[in-house]
Image (cartoon, rainbow, N blue to C red):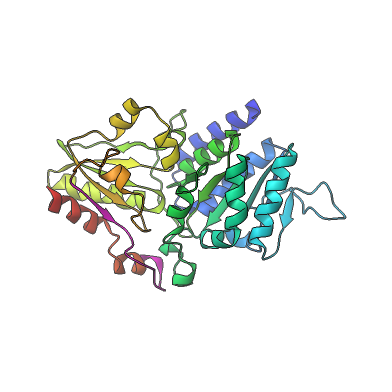
Amino acid sequence: MPTKLARALTAFRKEQAEAAPKVATRKASEMVLGVVNAALSETIGGSADLTGSNNTLTKDLGALSAENRKGRYVYYGIREHGMAAAMNGMALHGGVIPYGGTFLVFADYARGAMRLSALMGKRVIYVLTHDSIGLGEDGPTHQPVEHLAMLRATPGFHVFRPADVVETAEAWEAALTRSDGPSVLALSRQNLPAVRTEHNRKNLSAMGAYVLAEAEHRRAAILLATGSEVHIALEARALLERKGIGARVVSMPCWERFAAQDEAYRRRVLPAGAVRVGVEAAVRFGWDRWLCGERGADRKADFVGMPGFGASGPAGEVYAHFGITPEAVAAKVEALL
């Protein structure tokens, strides 16, 4: 990657940490791409007929067509598999870095080609928006409760689920600088509050997981969360601290990156001795590695997430309906103590 890209992204993260905007991470991705595409001429973007929803188009890219071979944006149509296959071809040819967008639930249609991205170890970046029950009124058919587990189970994928603008910028930087395999950015439809309001020159998301907020009282619990549920964990921490129960919040934007860290770092982030509660608007499958211990140890742990498919309704109401709330997280902790 060119030095100017790293400088531009560092400056962007600092600016956003200070501004602390409340935006959807799909919008945050568009903001980051404005920086990336200006500094990195090798990117070729696109979307499977969801450009306005995926926010993958930035100014001055121009549409790639028979008439405009200098265009850097592809309108793929409703062809998720075709888009993924074409991006594999671009990555195999070399000289370009392809990224393409669709809804996370539509990864089902691109699955065969996405698996080949991982199998071949090529740098293909999938921008998968509307990543949870938070997409709202489109209903359970569009709510991808099991898709994070499916992608995390695919060898070679790095699945990023950022919590705000700063984590989104870090995820993009990590995906772009990775040359040995594909990455997914799972992004929210709904607006999310900023959780990273202090600038850190180090890319914390590239570590996979990190301590976002430390316990004020004696640490009794660790709350682990990804993406749109990180702010819920922070609010649960505040409820617990008011009762004198110390709680650490760990943001886990990329499990695969965290698993690749040395054991000493993983133990610093997730030390023994505290109860653990995971929070994600998806199924529990895969979470027990981090909740119960990598060796399957008998640890007091629980999970707040989805027991099945979603429902149609405004994001806030759907979250409350399924009990993915700060109060529910805090109650789980108290029940374990």
Q: Is residue 62 visible?
A: yes
Q: Is residue 30 visible?
A: no
Q: Position of residue 176 (x, y in %)?
A: 60, 37
Quadrant of res 305: bottom left
- Relative to residue 179, is residue 146 depicted above or below? below
Residue at 49% in and 34% down: 14
Residue at 62% in and 32% down: 5
Quadrant location, the N terminus: top right
- Relative to residue 237, is residue 10 depicted above or below? above
Residue at 85% in and 52% down: 68
Q: Position of residue 236 (x, y in %)?
A: 24, 51
Q: Which residue sits furthest right?
A: 67
In this view, the residue in front, 211 or 121, is 121
Q: Position of residue 302 (x, y in %)?
A: 23, 52
Residue at 63% in and 26% down: 3
- Relative to residue 291, is residue 315 depicted above or below? below
In this view, the residue in front, 8 or 172, is 172
Stretch of the chain drawn in magenta: 300-316
In this view, the residue in front, 278 or 248, is 278
Label count reads: 0
Describe residue 182's horizontal placement relative to residue 70 as left or right: left
- Relative to residue 79, is residue 211 depicted above or below? above
Residue 302: in magenta span: yes
Describe residue 46's horizontal placement relative to residue 195 as left or right: right
Q: Position of residue 260 (x, y in %)?
A: 43, 32
Classified by dominant secondary structure, the portion drawn in magenta counts as loop
